[in-house]
Image: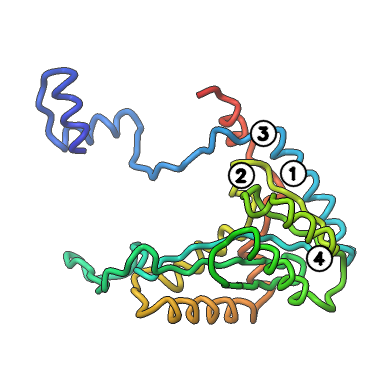
Amino acid sequence: MKKLKQWILRTFGRVAGRNSIRRVLRQAKLTWKKVKKLLGKAKPEKRAAHVQELLRLFTGVCDGDVLLIYVDEVHIHRDLDRGYTWGRRGERIWRKSDCPKLSDRLNAYGAYDFTNGECLLWQDGWCNGEHTVQFLHEVVRWRAGKKGRLVLIWDNAPCHVAKAVKAEAARLGIEIVNLPGYSPDLNPIERLWDWMREEVSRGFCHGSVQELHEACQAFIARINRDPIALVDRLWPKFELDPEFEDKLRVPT
């Protein structure tokens, strides 16, 4: 509202009150909304092709032939994430922080087994090519004895497309499917990270990175106890919103 008042003064040379501005906005059928980011470099045709491939993989999941794993990295700071919570009217809510350094954070790999409704959090330093290879071995151990060929879906991060990583995935018998560029909404594990932040770091500053790590692992263990609820919350996108996809075609 403050910016609008300044813009009206600069543009029209008039001073407008808040109530007058609100009245005009309502008459124009405008409302206060949160802005969402549109990744304009995303390619609609590649996104559509990925969804078609996912539908084919889903048939394999239903037939028991495919073990579908989504993978992504997560970086959670030891300091609290700010957000909404319940509080008394007219009173500000305070949460104490000991001002951790930016380096005080959890760097971890995550895997979401869509076929079985189970998640894995694996943390071993920085997320680079060497650790990605180690993580692939961890995924194979984690899913040992499960039915179906292992298909892994992830984005095109440098540590994912490294030659050593691709070679090791092939040696381990892991089929890799890369997400189309600039399409985090097609990876349901992104919602897992939002969920974990909401439960673990929203409004709470952990005493150490180790405490943060333990809290995250406890969260993963808790959600793994209800596979149906887990899959329901992290259901992949099998259909694209035409309105959203059309916006990607508009030149910027």
Question: Dot 1 surroundings within 10 Å: few (below 14), some, or many (20 or more)?
Answer: some
Who's the residue at 57% across and 57% down the image? 190
Q: CA distance from mark 1 to mark 3?
A: 10 Å
Q: Is residue 184 left or right of 6 when viewed as pictured?
A: right
- Disc 2: which residue: 183
Callouts 1 and 3 close, C-beta under 8 Å: no
Do the residues under discs 1 and 2 have CB atoms within 8 angstroms? yes
Image quadrant containing the N terminus: top left
Q: Which residue is mark 4?
A: 67
Residue 170 image position (x, y, % from top left) = 83, 58
Dot 1 or dot 3, earlier in sequence: 3
State which tag comes first along the sequence, 4 or 3: 3
Q: Which residue is mark 1?
A: 50
Query: At label 3, which amino acid type do we have?
Result: Pro
> Which image quadrant for residue 52?
top right
Which residue, given by chain and number where applicable, does mark 3 sit on? 44
The circle drawn on residue 206 is none
Asked if residue 98 lies left or right of residue 34, the reply is left
User: Which of the two discs, 1 and 2, labels the residue nearer the N terminus?
Assistant: 1
In the image, residue 154 above or below residue 250: below
Q: Who is closer to the viewer here, 53 or 158?
A: 158
